[in-house]
Amino acid sequence: MAVLCSNCSGKLVFNPAYQKLECSACGSRFDPEDVKDINADAQSKYYDTRVYTCAHCGAEIITSDTEVSTFCVYCGNPAINFSRIKKEYKPDGLIPFQITKEEAAAKIKEKFLANPFIPKEVKSKAVPENIRGIYVPYWIVNARFTEASYIQAEVNNGEKIVTKYYQRVGTCNFQNIPIDGSNILLDEVSSRLEPFYFAEAKEFDEDYLNGFYSNTSDMTYKNLQNAVAARCHELYSKEACSTVENGKSFVNDAAYWAYIQDDPLYMMMPVWFFTFIYKNEPHTILINGQSGKVVGTMPWSKKKIGMLFASVCLAILALMVLAAVGIAFDFGGLKDLYNIFIVVVALIAAGTVVPGLLGLRKIRNNITLTKADAIFKFVKKRQG
């Protein structure tokens, strides 16, 4: 529930820029550890949150009582009605937001908005008012892992590419593996937010949540075991492949299992979510609230890309026609020079168009993640 300023009774909100609670009325600042809510039970394993329901789309928005500009993160509608008070399980700790909302918006602009292919209507939405901070649940796990791998490698023996096979078996211990605690937020997306630096972690104090949303874990222990095994397999396979001959290698088949050691720590990690609608499709950009790392990409204007591609192709075609004309008429005995010119034009075309197409493929894959409906549902329904 809301914690009030001792100077003026205004609501206190955590300010990442100062790592302090700041009064929204008089500007006074306090260390979270020095502020106590007289209504809170320090011995309880639970803390209170407030549930709001969007009258427009029905989404549930769950916050502390100090989210000063509550609106529906899903549809942007301000018609939010208080629904109920809900008790949530207290985490063991959290990493406070280090990046402010304004800095998160600047990170987005720095990475994307100078690009001329991003539509203006998308650029106009990348403002602090449309960015929301959410504490995402993570389990920090120690595990003992065993794997037997069958590795396939494509190796150049000097004459041709040959396929070779290798076997690797090993057991190792993994320490402090971060596992996203939500079944809805895609693991591929949450893993890209890493790393988080646990040296800056704090013992859980709900005052750090003031002014932010937060999510709670919905994983069963079986879910956690499977997620740990998959993450350890990913890390182990990368190292196993690095032990074979130089070449393109991958794990063709593997049997593996992981045993969780000790009790996992339940932690909250800071993430800024920038959600927006473009051409009736949801998009979400994530920013690591500790490091400022940006995950996702902006939609590009297909029309502008098509025009550029067509212009480049026409320019190359025109140059090749000019070169061919020069060869046909052998202007000034420069036939050899024109032959060289054709080769140069061909190389420029290959060096420009082909990487460009590969780059567009990568961007398209990133946009697919950015548009992932699961991420948007996380923002819509799983903010806790």
Image (cartoon, rainbow, N blue to C red):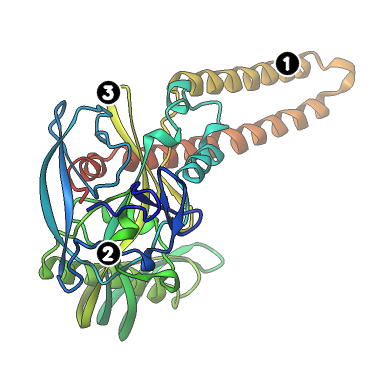
Q: Kindly identify the amino acid type of the residue bearing the numbered disc 1.
A: Leu
Instruction: Of the two numbered discs 2 and 1 on the same chain, state the one appearing first in sequence.
Output: 2
In the rendered image, the residue lying farthest to the front is 7
Q: Kindly identify the amino acid type of the residue bearing the numbered disc 3.
A: Asn
On the image, the x and y values in percent for residue 379 come to 25, 43
Q: Which residue is denoted by mark 2 in the rendering?
A: 138
Question: Residue drawn 56% across and 21% down?
Answer: 308
How far apart, in angstroms, are the residues tagged by discs 3 and 2? 31 Å
Q: Kindly identify the amino acid type of the residue bearing the numbered disc 2.
A: Tyr
Tell us which disc is closer to us: 3 or 2: 2
Left or right for 131, reference 352: left
Q: Secondary structure at mark 2?
A: strand
Q: Which residue is denoted by mark 1 in the rendering?
A: 322
Q: Which residue is denoted by mark 3 in the rendering?
A: 280
Left or right for 317, reference 134: right
Q: Nearer the viewer, residue 383 or 344?
A: 383
Q: Nearer the viewer, residue 83 or 193?
A: 83
Q: Are marks 3 and 1 in contact (CB under 8 Å)?
A: no
On the image, the x and y values in percent for residue 169 come to 29, 84
